Image: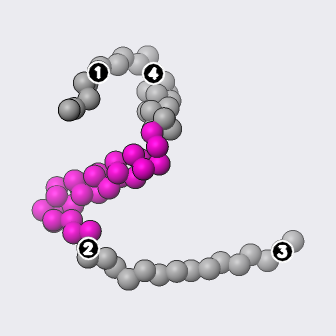
Amino acid sequence: MSTPKTIQRFSSHAEQKAEINRYWQSRTPGERFIAVWEATAAAYAFKGIRYDATRRSPVTLTRVQRTKG
């Protein structure tokens, strides 16, 4: 079942940005992660590349230690 679409009018760009921020802050971290995942897959598809989550680049870990003071 899909969510019904709504149209909103905003009097300024700042008001629109604030509403977008409120929306994403109301979503759970998991929902935000899935949205980014879907956008990434769509971007790859737009370029004609099938996004394969099983193919991963090597993981690189870096530790930065700051000096005290």
Q: Which of pointers 3 and 4 indicates the residue nearer the eye?
A: 3
Residue placed under numbered mark 2 in the picture: 54
Say how many tags the image has: 4
**Secondary structure found at label 4:** loop
Sequence-wise first label, 1 or 2: 1
Whether the magenta-drawn stretch holds residue 35 is answered as yes
For image coordinates 29% across by 21% down, the residue present is: 6
Residue placed under numbered mark 3 in the picture: 68
Residue placed under numbered mark 4 in the picture: 12
- Please rate how many residues cluster around mark 3, counting C-alpha atoms within 10 Å: few if below 14, some from 14 to 19, many from 20: few
Residue 59 vs 33, above or below: the answer is: below
Cα separation, mark 3 vs mark 2, equals 41 Å
Residue placed under numbered mark 1 in the picture: 6
- Asked whether the residues under the numbered discs 3 and 1 touch, taking CB atoms below 8 Å apart as contact, a structural biologist would say no
**Secondary structure found at label 1:** loop
Cα separation, mark 3 vs mark 1, equals 52 Å
